[in-house]
Image (cartoon, rainbow, N blue to C red):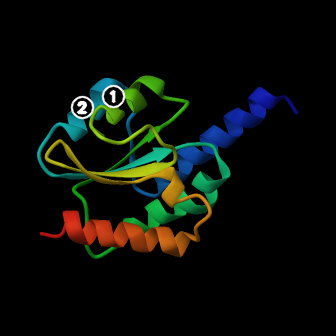
Amino acid sequence: MDFQLFMNDVVQTARKEMVEGGYQELTTPEEVDAVLSKSGTSFVMINSVCGCAGGIARPSAQYMKNYEVQADNYVTVFAGQDREATAQARTYFEGYEPSSPSFALVKDGKIQTMIERHEIEGYEPIEVVQKLERAFDEYFKK
């Protein structure tokens, strides 16, 4: 099998999981600004093709759509794929190094906190969900 074809399948599957999970895919810098610069809360999943994204991060992100505390927007950018959109999203994550997969909680255009790759990789999905629930409770509860 051609490696590029294989990677395209992996990327398409990763994108599909997020869209089917109720996330809006942001693929351009303009789309990023249209969501993250406005008032309200946004939960951003920085997607990637690594194993911890597929086995831990994406399932955790999908779970959060059903949590009692909700964000106004559930969006995703794809690191390594939609480079300009990801770079633009990262301009909102002041104080945090680029990390993928990762999660950002943004309120009124300002980063509140991030769950970075080192807090995802090597953890069980339930542990990541618990971190996300605590963050939602602290930053998004009305």
- Quadrant of image for the N terminus: top right
Residue at position x 33%, y 25% from top?
A: 29
In the image shown, does 81 or 114 lie closer to the viewer? Answer: 114
With respect to residue 74, does 136 lie above or below? below
Looking at the image, is mark 1 or mark 2 nearer the viewer? 1
Whole-percent x and y of residue 16? Answer: 55, 47
Residue 142's disc number: none
Residue 88's disc number: 1
Crowding at dot 1, Cα within 10 Å, few <14 / some 14-19 / many 20+, comes out as: some
- Check whether the beta carbons of the residues at disc 1 and disc 2 lie within 8 A of each other: yes
Residue ID for mark 2: 33
Q: Decide if residue 89 is on the left or right side of residue 13.
A: left
Whole-percent x and y of residue 122? Answer: 62, 63
Q: Decide if residue 70 is on the left or right side of residue 142.
A: right
Whole-percent x and y of residue 137? Answer: 24, 72
- Helix, strand or loop at disc 1? helix
Amino acid type shown at disc 2:
Asp
Residue at position x 34%, y 72% from top?
A: 133
- Quadrant of image for the C terminus: bottom left
Is residue 37 at least partly visible in the picture? yes
Report, in whole angstroms, how far the alpha carbon at label 1 lies from the one at label 2: 8 Å
